[in-house]
Image (cartoon, rainbow, N blue to C red):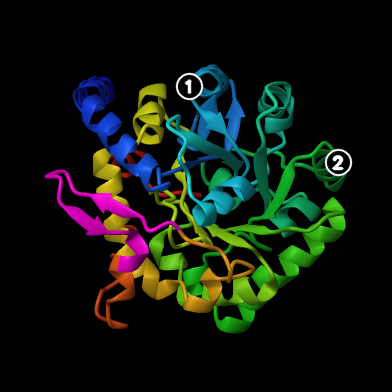
Amino acid sequence: MLNVRLALLTLYYHATWPLRRWWIRRWQKQACVPMSVLLYHRIASDCPVSWVTSLSAFRQHLAWLRRHAEVVSLHEIQARLISGNRESRPCVAITFDDGYADNLREAVPLLLEARMPFTFFVTVTNLLQERRFAHDLEQGQSWRLVSPRELRELADSGVEVGSHGLTHADYSLLNIDELVREINDSKHILEDLAGRPVRALAIPFGQPRQMTPEVFQIAYEAGYTCVCSAYGGYNIPGRHRFHIRRFHGDDPLIRLINQVTIDPRLVWQTQRDSVWEAQSERPGSLMRGNEDAIVAPCTLLSQDGEQRPAVGETSARLPTGTAPLPEAGAATSPDKVLLGGNL
Ligand SMILES: [Zn+2]
């Protein structure tokens, strides 16, 4: 079944290639070419669960990205959300969640050798107490996480360290005090461990039900410069500079190529999600440090060629409370149906 899906996706990719090129040329003129951020977990030779990417697949991803894409840091993605992106090649950032030690053996050296920046998100308590993740134990796995010393070495080698919370809790189940502790304390502890500022926060599970207004507000007040979700979508210059959307990278190569070369369906999905996202991101959180930035007047094009307002412009006109949040765990793309939820 998977092979059939991938074969259909390959056909779809080639059939929509002319449309993608046409769209990208239009977006280039407006400096708002969408950008992708990839999310990986554990890279290893053994892949007993869906959140492990095989080493061979990861090598394929890097080889393709090196040849066809511009791999940039999260910071650069955020900068282009403000200043615009005219790059015709896919602009891609790489992130890892959970902090698996196995990544130090293969994935990290490959990235460092290729001089590709990436962000490594770790969960503080699991790291400090050498506590395995519940989602791994439930699958009969006991994968080690990086130690404080290994984290410091990563940071010293130029890798950006980000927070993946204090305890990998489900933020949709926490009260305000618990959220503040998760978001604030993890930042401070990690800054001590890494010896440098921690600017990015990746919300555990990262689904719509965890991305609440309270989470954005607390993260903003804690001093983070961006919050990452994990349910897919592009990062489109114009608005939403505080929220970084991410695609799963732990996928077959054709799915990665289809995503980063701007899939029209996923552009539509990004537009749709932005309706309720705008109500989660409070206006103050959008403007941290960017108050004087000139934002490109982006427009998105529908498949029939009709011009539509950019993501932020569309949602900004909606009265608060009129658009419901998606159902918890609701699938937002065919890719996500296949993958299931994020960790
Ligand atoms: Zn996680």
Q: Which residue is mark 1?
A: 68
Q: Is mark 1 within 8 Å of ligand 1?
A: no
* Residue at the spot 28% in from the left edge and 25% down from the top edge: 2
The number of numbered discs placed on residues in the rendered structure image is 2
Question: Which amino acid, mark 1?
Answer: His
Q: Residue at x 28, y 82 (%)?
A: 319
- At a point 49% along the width and 73% down the height, the residue shown is 173
Above or below, 141 against 16 in this view is below
Mark number displayed over residue 156: 2
Q: Residue furthest left?
A: 304
- At 75% from the left and 51% from the top, the residue drawn is 127
Mark nearer the viewer, 1 or 2: 1
Residue count near mark 2 (Cα–Cα under 10 Å), binned few <14, some 14–19, many ≥20 = few
CA–CA distance in space, label 1 to label 2: 29 Å
In terms of secondary structure, where does tag 1 sit? Answer: helix
Sequence-first tag of 1 and 2: 1
Q: Amino acid at mark 2?
A: Asp
The reply to whether residue 164 is visible in this rendering is yes
Identify the element where label 2 is drawn: helix
* Percent position of residue 295, x then y: 47, 60
**What are the residue bounds of the magenta stretch?**
296-313
